[in-house]
Amino acid sequence: MTAVSPIATALPDLVLRAFAPEHIPGAMRLSQEAGWPHRAEDWALTLSVSQGVVALHDGEIVGTALCSIFGDVALINMIIVDARMRGQGLGRKLMQAVLELAGTRELRLTATTDGRPLYEKLGFEVTGEILQHQGIALSDDPELPVVEGDAQGIAAMDLAAGGSDRAALLTHIAERGTVLRAEGGFALLRDFGRGQVLGPIVARDAATARALLSGAATRAEGSFLRVDLADPALAEHATRLGLAHVGGGTAMMKGAAPAATSEYTTYALASQALG
């Protein structure tokens, strides 16, 4: 698929083209329409580690879909259809396009309520729930020491926890954000949407994960902070830090490889798009 080779669809006057940086403004219109907080910088971060498609109708972007490949794992994300185009099969066509990009890799995504029926029809199975917590962060004393550090070794911990090779993504985030480290874990804090987002949080145990969350909340005290929890063990602690549960999504997977045993767990996602 190339930007100069449109793919015909069954929908009249509509073509799919490869997602390129110049499509970000049109994609932002769709994400804002959907109520998502993504800035241009947030779209650009996801696109920097992704391939994808946009759907064009009379030159206007009316749909988006991205596929982020991390080794043997592909994350399907940013599936958005213009409200005026829904119910015409465009969502399925966008999914089919990015599934082709993913090839035979293990597939993962975070589903919205509206998107879940389609993903189930395409063979995805529910593996868990993602809990979105956000609010004005409150300061807290971590139960274990947390310091700001460098990115050395964090990709190996992340790979052990999630089975996907996200070294390039983590480096990109670390260069623009803050790396928080504790004995047996790390977390990344960066600008996103309305304020900042914390994620991923990767740790050997819940106590370490709670400490990293406390450390981030203290650094973000008095400002907006979001965290997307993959493990409900941190939900009560997040709420105590001023981050209320405001929704989330459904973690889904297709073609899952046997999970390797690991001492590390992913307690919070980098984002719902990027796992």
Image (spheres, rainbow, N blue to C red):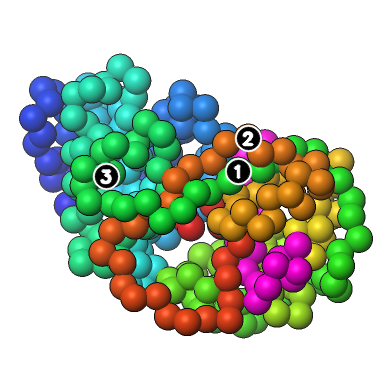
| Residue at image mark 2 | 246
Q: What element carries label 3?
A: helix
Q: Residue 242 carries which label?
A: none
The residue drawn where x is 86% and y is 64% is 142
Gap in angstroms between the C-alphas marked 2 and 1:
6 Å
Instruction: Look at the image and say whether residue 198 sits in the magenta stretch.
Output: yes
- Chain-order first, disc 3 or disc 1: 3
In the image, residue 50 sits, relative to residue 15, either above or below, namely: below
Place residue 10 in its image quadrant.
top left
- Chain-order first, disc 2 or disc 1: 1
Place residue 145 in its image quadrant.
bottom right
Instruction: Look at the image and say whether residue 86 sits in the magenta stretch.
Output: no
| Residue at image mark 3 | 120
Left or right of residue 231: residue 66: left
| Residue at image mark 1 | 132
Which amino acid lies under the numbered mark 2 shown in the image of this protein?
A: Val
- Chain-order first, disc 3 or disc 2: 3
Which amino acid lies under the numbered mark 1 shown in the image of this protein?
A: Gln
Taking depth in this image into account, of 2 and 106 the one nearest to the observer is: 106
Q: Is mark 1 on a helix, strand or loop?
A: strand
Gap in angstroms between the C-alphas marked 3 and 1:
22 Å
Which percent across, then down, holds residue 5? 13, 45
Q: Decide: few, some or many residues near mark 3? Use Cα within 10 Å; few <14, some 14-19, many ≥20.
A: some
Which percent across, then down, holds residue 275? 48, 57
Question: Is any part of residue 14 visible from this angle?
Answer: yes
Q: Is mark 2 on a helix, strand or loop?
A: strand
The residue drawn where x is 76% and y is 62% is 210
Is the Cβ of the residue at disc 3 closer than 8 Å to that at disc 1? no
**What's the magenta region?**
191-210
The residue drawn where x is 81% and y is 46% is 240
Gap in angstroms between the C-alphas marked 3 and 2:
24 Å
